[in-house]
Image (cartoon, helix red, strand yellow):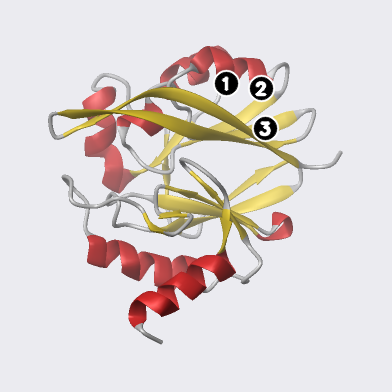
Amino acid sequence: MTVRIDRIVTSGVFSLDGQDFAVDNNVWLIGNDREVLVIDAAHDAEAILEAVGSRTVKAIVSTHGHNDHVNAAPDVARATGAPVLLHRDDLMLWQMTHPNRPPDEELTDGDVLSVAGSELRVLHTPGHSPGGVCLYAADLATVFSGDTLFKGGPGATGRSYSDLRTLLASIRRQLLTLPRQTVVRTGHGDNTRIDAEAADELARRGS
């Protein structure tokens, strides 16, 4: 069966450093009619479970630990029996939202997650948060970037546990080296492509 990528947009609040922001999040589902991988279970477990349907959830992958990317993860895990995966460097962020429910498994740079015959390679991309990751599916010509890279530039920094220089280094090392036609499916907003963001990066550097 053909692998497909579905997007659900859920709405809620991002909270950090005593501030709250209304946000719309992209929740990505990768799989076929039998099984699926959920990326960033945000805000609305019921909507995510409806999109999953009767399929087996292989895992719930969190690209990072900010509350707006993980707040529905335990409920989706409870309903499906799937493990929640997170890079250990973001555990302190996860615990702000779920102090009594740890993730089930750790993500590490270079890990490979399989679903419906497709493989997604974990790319550690710290900067937006220490444990931020992206997921690269070469056969789908796609990278799921979380809040690392957006259409027009890098994710936000300036809040606790974030650092712009680190983020830019991650983008240059892990993402701009991918094939230029790779579609970037982001944590918020519209898709972009590596070639478009590489061009923007060259412009910022004056090349």
Work out how far the residue at label 2 is from the one at label 1, CA to CA, in angstroms: 6 Å
Specify whether 178 is left or right of 67: right
In the shown orientation, is residue 28 left or right of residue 149? Answer: right
What's under tag 2, amino acid-wise? Val
Residue at 45% over, 53% down: 150
Q: Could you tell me if the residues under marks 3 and 1 are in contact, i.e. CB atoms within 8 Å?
A: no
Q: Residue at x 18, y 51 (%)?
A: 158
Residue that mark 3 sits on:
36
Q: Mark 3 or mark 1: which comes first in sequence?
A: 3
Q: With 23 as the anchor, is 61 left or right in this view?
A: right
- Name of the residue lying farthest toward the right: 1
| Label 2 with label 3: CB-CB less than 8 Å | yes
Residue 111, image x and y in percent? 52, 54
The residue at which mark 2 appears reads as 52
Q: Quarter holding the C terminus?
A: bottom left
Looking at marks 2 and 3 on the same chain, the residue that comes earlier in the sequence is marked by 3
**Residue extending furthest left?**
18
- Crowding near pointer 1: few (<14 within 10 Å), some, many (20+)? many
Residue name at image x 48 percent, y 28 percent: 41
Q: Amino acid at mark 3?
A: Val
Above or below, 201 against 186 in this view is: below
Q: Are marks 2 and 1 in contact (CB under 8 Å)?
A: yes
Dividing the picture into quadrants, the one containing residue 152 is bottom left
Q: Nearer the viewer, mark 3 or mark 1?
A: 1
Q: Which mark is residue 124?
A: none
